[in-house]
Image: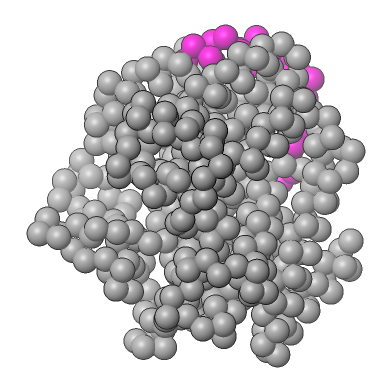
Amino acid sequence: MRYLKNIILLLLGVSYWVDMFLVHVILMLAYAALILAQDIGGRNLKRFDVSTTYAFLLLITNVAHMVVLSGLSDDPWFFTKSYSEELSGKAIFVFNMGSVVILEALRFFIKIDNNLSPTQVRSLQLKFWPVFLISAGIFSLSNFINPLLWSVGSVGSFISLIVQGSILLLSFIAHSTKRNIIVVLLYTVFLSVWALQYSFLRMTILIPWVAYLSGDIIASGSLYKIHSYSKGVVILAFLIFPPLFTFLGNKRSDLYGKEKLSASVNLLSSNQELEGQSITSRLSIIPQVSNIILLTRKNGFYNGETLSYFKYVFIPRFIWPDKPLIRQGQWFAVEIGNAYYNKQGKANNSVNMTVPGEFYLNFGWTGLIMGCLLFGGVMATIWNVTDYNSLYGWVFRFYLIFLGLFSLGADLQVVPTLVAYVILYKALLFVGRFF
């Protein structure tokens, strides 16, 4: 398989220079599928880490790209009058080649420790109900002190993350022991329905299910051996989420709470056709990376302008209360003409640059390759400094697994967040030694 992968990588580069963008996308599909087959395609799980989920992201993203480049969709969200097929193809290539470098760096540097020892598994089996109560307690408390959590930055967001990450651990324990599976399933349903009602972002509905399924995969050691409940969840997700995604995108500002839940149930029980951004077009990176290429043609490369916040980002806000807010997505939206600043100085929209896109915007092809190589190495190092020996480790690794499914972050702003999380993770482990 290594030789086949090397041939595919060679052909990926050639496809750009001969402007065969559809062929390039097909080759990327083959590349991502090959990685997934190596990791989870056989009877025994070879590895399951952030590189595995990132390969899955590249697979489904390039399915979306194949749909648009082959003319199978006229969804207006794929194109605007600003894009051409040539521009879209170059945007896809920038993202894909940066992603290949990131993925290869992850594959090279991550230490594979997928199999937990029998001692670790037995130790974890005793922790199901304590972990469940901690998770439920944090969830209940966070709904009363949510503004306070967000006011303390990374500390608050990491505490909130414990609820979602605990599902990964609970699912692993339940499926390892074949006990309490229904408890975890119902808790996952509850968190997903709660997100449906009260969250502005659609992906928060999926996050608990990513944790649940990932825990089952790790426990089962094979996709073929996952529980029948998990197989049913996958089938239902393909049937339910695409129309729900489009519907919630249209109604996110109009509905809230029980009204939102009721309207979603009515939608799924009817056969009405929906207009709006489809999940396929949402998976495409054509709009944002095409705009990045347009910016470089207009203004030249930005030479690190979007990364200037790295000079002060690690200074704690309690030391510098007036530290500037980092809102790169808002800056980018304004820069490409998709947003404006209001009187309070806040933009009315935010657009993700993607990690490869931001490297290209600043430094061109050389920066794209070298930057993505460094980024992949940093992500792999962060994975390696965590483990499955504590609740915090499961939470942290779940966050990385989740990031793999969502482009490893909207832009390079994810790096300071991860560094802050590593510090918190290590601090919690240190404090835990005394209790």
- Would you say residue 280 is visible in this rendering? yes
Q: In the rendering, at what x and y percent does residue 118 appear?
A: 79, 20
The quadrant in which residue 154 appears is top left
The structure residue drawn at horizontal position 84% and vertical position 46%, both measured from the top left corner, is 41
Judged left or right of residue 264, residue 115 is: right
Q: Residue furthest left?
A: 343
Q: Nearer the viewer, residue 102 or 220?
A: 220
Answer above or below: position of 347 versus 169.
below
Q: Quadrant of residue 173?
A: top right
Q: Is residue 386 visible?
A: no
Q: Residue furthest front?
A: 271
Dominant secondary-structure state across the stretch colored magenta: helix
Highlighted magenta segment, given as a residue range: 110-134
Residue shown at 27% from the left, 21% from the top: 144
Against 10, residue 250 (above or below) is above
For this view, does 89 lie left or right of residue 159?
A: right
Residue 362 is situated, as x and y percent measured from the top left of the image, at 42, 76
User: What colour-coding does the image apply?
Assistant: one colour
